[in-house]
């Protein structure tokens, strides 16, 4: 896929939204997508764009509207694979990226799914209340 088509896909990307369950904060996702689109349009090296997509961490929200985590993870994975980066192994139960040192779970269905590698740890009550 060429860079212009990928940038256009990112500009027009729409995600399902969540409310009262975990989702990524919309502003954080929008900022990263804008950054990646900017990198694509100015001609940044593929490895720099892949690094941006893979190293991004997003705060989560549960009481407010957020983006569906699986949708965002899938789009960022598409960016990585489109630019020749290595795909992150995924857990078969939830589709969330797993750490590279832990193999995907394929035989055990009783184990808890691994959290997305893009999730920031939840903040405390006061930090959420004060918006920090």
Image (tube, rainbow, N blue to C red):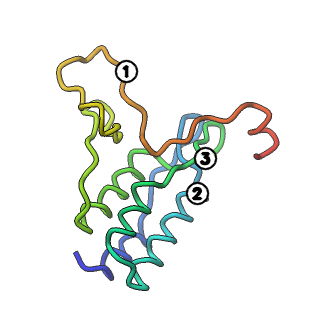
What number is the disc on residue 28? 2
The secondary element bearing badge 2 is classed as helix
Is 91 on the left or on the right of 49, as rendered? left
Element on which disc 1 rests: loop
Task: Measure the alpha-carbon separation of dots 3 and 2.
Answer: 13 Å
Q: Secondary structure at mark 3?
A: loop
**Residue 3 locus on image (x, y percent):** 31, 79
Q: Nearer the viewer, residue 100 or 12?
A: 100
Q: Quadrant of the N terminus?
A: bottom left
Asked if 90 appears above or below 67 in the picture, the reply is: above
Q: Which of marks 1 and 3 precedes in the sequence? A: 3
Q: Earlier in the sequence, mark 3 or mark 2?
A: 2
Marks 3, 1: nearer the viewer = 1
Q: Earlier in the sequence, mark 2 or mark 1?
A: 2
Q: CA distance from mark 2 to mark 1?
A: 27 Å
Residue 65 is labelled as 3
Which of the 4 quarters of the picture holds residue 19?
top right
- Point out residue 59 in the picture as x, y percentages from the top left corner: 59, 46
Q: What residue is drawn where x is 72% and y is 31%?
A: 124
Figure check: 110 above or below 14: above
Residue 68 location in percent, x, y?
A: 46, 46
* Residue 49 image point, x, y percent: 39, 69
Q: Nearer the viewer, mark 3 or mark 2?
A: 2
- Report if the CB atoms under discs 3 and 1 are less than 8 Å apart: no
Q: Is residue 118 left or right of residue 93?
A: right
Label 2 CA crowd tier, 10 Å (few <14, some 14–19, many 20+): some
The residue lying furthest to the top in this view is 110
In the picture, the disc for residue 112 is 1
């Amino acid at each position: 896929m060429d860079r212009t088509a990928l940038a256009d896909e990112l500009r027009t990307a729409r995600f399902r939204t969540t409310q009262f369950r975990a989702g990524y904060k919309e502003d954080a996702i929008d900022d990263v997508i804008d950054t990646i689109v900017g990198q694509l349009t100015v001609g940044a090296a593929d490895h720099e764009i892949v690094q941006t997509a893979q190293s991004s961490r997003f705060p989560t929200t549960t009481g407010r509207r957020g983006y569906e985590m699986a949708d965002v993870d899938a789009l960022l994975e598409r960016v990585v694979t489109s630019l020749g980066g290595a795909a992150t192994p995924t857990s078969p139960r939830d589709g969330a990226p797993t750490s590279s040192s832990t193999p995907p779970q394929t035989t055990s269905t009783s184990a808890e799914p691994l959290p997305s590698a893009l999730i920031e740890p939840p903040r405390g009550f006061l930090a959420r209340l004060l918006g920090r």
